[in-house]
Amino acid sequence: MKHLFGITLIFTLTFPAVAWSLFYDFENEKQLDDWKVIQGTWSIIDGELDGKGPQAGQPGVMLVLADHVWKEEWEDYTVEFKAKILEDTEDAGVTFRWQKAEPNDRRYYLYRIDNWPRGFNQKQAEGWVAGDMQGQNKIDMEPDTWYKFKLEVVGNKFNCYLDDELMFKLEDTKNTYSWGRIGFRMWNSHARYDDLDIRGPGIPGAAVNPGGKITTAWGQIKAHQ
């Protein structure tokens, strides 16, 4: 997973407008400058984004795209990435339409895989809408194994995929959060992420080259070696 090659056009049937792609391969530590750490310890290790907790007694582990990257007008988007849970800990997932995360004021949606080793070995994909679990699907899941996530966010409807299989469809009839940024979130866990691709109306194409500079592109293909 060490080389970038080629440029391709990205077309989508989800959105009425041509969508560009914001891409992170986490091959360079400077890419962390585009992120805001909310909780936990985050770093780039071996070309992968590494997050772990707890830190200072706080079990949450979260980071989101920074203010200078994300625009509030980016409301609808498709998100794809890979994630794996390390050390047989609990979960890994993506927050979307994230607005804030305070101890008593959490404003975001969540799609995750959950290993729950707390006595009843619950392994499942979960979708949370405005704090309530709305989607649930049992899965076979192993630690140290990459899983491919895909999330389609259009209006108040959200399609959640895992390894190209539709896990469930979510809908927030109250349209609680109509805008907000993308981030990663775990709970008392250690996980890694890679090959994050975000596309949607108005989102500019960008990828960080090995020199750490931003370059514009429609999309990048990453070769795994």
Image (cartoon, rainbow, N blue to C red):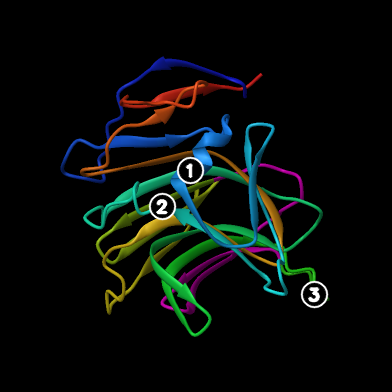
Give the CA separation, mark 3 to mark 1.
Answer: 35 Å
Q: Secondary structure at mark 1?
A: helix
Classify mark 3: residues with Cα within 10 Å, few (<14), some (14-19) or many (20+).
Answer: few
Give the CA separation, mark 2 to mark 1.
Answer: 8 Å
**Of the image marks 3 and 1, the number of the one nearer the N terminus:** 1
What residue is shown with label 3? 118
The residue mark sitting in front, 3 or 2, is: 2
User: Is mark 3 in CB contact (under 8 Å) with mark 2?
Assistant: no
Classify residue 60 as left or right of residue 165.
right
Q: Position of residue 31 (x, y in %)?
A: 50, 37
Task: Based on the picture, tell me whether residue 146 belongs to the magenta stretch.
Answer: yes
Residue bounds of the magenta highlight: 123-148
In what quadrant of the picture does the N terminus appear? Answer: top right
Q: Which mark is residue 66?
A: 2
Give the CA separation, mark 3 to mark 2.
Answer: 34 Å
User: Is mark 2 in CB contact (under 8 Å) with mark 1?
Assistant: yes
Using the rendered view, name the quadrant where residue 39 is placed: bottom right
180, 84: nearer the viewer: 180
Classify residue 149 as left or right of residue 53.
left
| Residue for point 35% across, 54% down | 67
The extreme left residue here reads: 16
Q: Amino acid at mark 1?
A: Asp
Classify mark 1: residues with Cα within 10 Å, few (<14), some (14-19) or many (20+).
Answer: few
What residue is shown with label 1? 33
- Would residue 138 be seen by someone viewing this image from the given angle? no
**Of the image marks 3 and 2, the number of the one nearer the N terminus:** 2
User: Is mark 3 in CB contact (under 8 Å) with mark 1?
Assistant: no
| Residue for point 66% across, 18% down | 225
Q: Position of residue 112 (x, y in %)?
A: 56, 61
